[in-house]
């Protein structure tokens, strides 16, 4: 009895899967990079929102005597700025420190009047550390600017 002949190798070109993968890989990386980047942007935005809200709540509920004295008002504003920076500690979106702006009735908190509203604004630039060559064309060299504002009515103690 004779043995069956071994199967013949197919005449398909070899390496076509590697070529297809090389053509599709940049698109797959882009589809992966964009959701990761915007997810990170939303995460940092949420942290900034919570920090500005907590600082505005602190300012809105501090004692009236603290807002009638310029020296005490400077300390209260510095404490509110410290609240924001402490909550953003380790969570900076880029290489530069975030900018914190605090105002009373739309102007500087001077200490000569009790404000009706207090506002805390936090601004930061989100830089892409994972795939910067993709986001550079979309956002430029500076990154994505994130800005959060929290305003509250002064209620005092």
Image (cartoon, grey):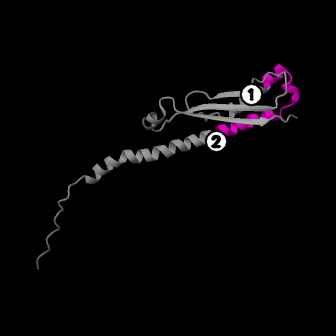
Q: Which residue is drawn at 30% across and 51% down?
A: 20
Name the quadrant containing residue 72: top right
Q: Give the range drawn in magenta.
A: 46-75
Name the quadrant containing residue 132: top left
Reply above or below: 7 against 67.
Answer: below
Residue 46: mark: 2
Q: Residue at x 82, y 29 (%)?
A: 115
Reply above or below: 34 against 55.
Answer: below
Q: Is residue 25 left or right of residue 119?
A: left
Q: Which residue is drawn at 13% across and 75% down?
A: 3
Q: Is the magenta stretch mostly helix, strand or loop?
A: helix
Which x, y percent locates residue 116? Answer: 82, 31
For mark 1, does the 10 Å Cα neighbourhood hold few (<14), some (14 to 19), or many (20 or more) residues?
A: few
Q: Is residue 89 left or right of residue 110?
A: left
What is the quadrant of the N terminus in the image? bottom left
Which x, y percent locates residue 80? Answer: 75, 30
What is the quadrant of the C terminus in the image? top right
Which x, y percent locates residue 140? Answer: 47, 31
Reply above or below: 146 against 34.
Answer: above
Q: Is residue 148 left or right of residue 76?
A: left
Which x, y percent locates residue 40? Answer: 55, 41
> Does the magenta portion include 45?
no
Q: Residue at x 11, y 77 (%)?
A: 2
Name the quadrant containing residue 6: bottom left
Residue lying furthest top in this view? Answer: 71
Identify the residue under disc 1: 106
> Does the magenta portion include 54?
yes
Mark 1–mark 2 distance (CA, rounded to whole Å): 24 Å
Residue 148: mark: none
Q: What element carries label 1?
A: loop
For mark 2, does the 10 Å Cα neighbourhood hold few (<14), some (14 to 19), or many (20 or more) residues?
A: few
Q: What element carries label 2?
A: helix
């Amino acid at each position: 009895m004779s043995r069956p002949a071994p199967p013949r190798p197919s005449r398909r070109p070899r390496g076509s899967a590697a070529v297809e993968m090389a053509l599709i890989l940049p698109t797959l990386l882009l589809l992966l990079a964009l959701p990761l980047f915007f997810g990170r942007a939303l995460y940092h935005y949420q942290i900034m929102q919570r920090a500005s809200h907590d600082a505005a709540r602190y300012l809105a509920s501090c004692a009236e005597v603290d807002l009638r004295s310029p020296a005490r008002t400077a300390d209260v504003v510095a404490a509110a700025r410290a609240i924001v920076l402490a909550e953003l500690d380790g969570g900076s979106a880029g290489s530069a420190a975030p900018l914190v702006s605090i105002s009373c009735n739309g102007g500087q908190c001077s200490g000569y009047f009790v404000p009706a509203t207090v506002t805390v604004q936090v601004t930061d630039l989100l830089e892409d550390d994972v795939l910067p060559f993709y986001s550079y064309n979309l956002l430029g060299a500076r990154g994505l600017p994130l800005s959060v504002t929290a305003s509250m009515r002064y209620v005092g103690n």
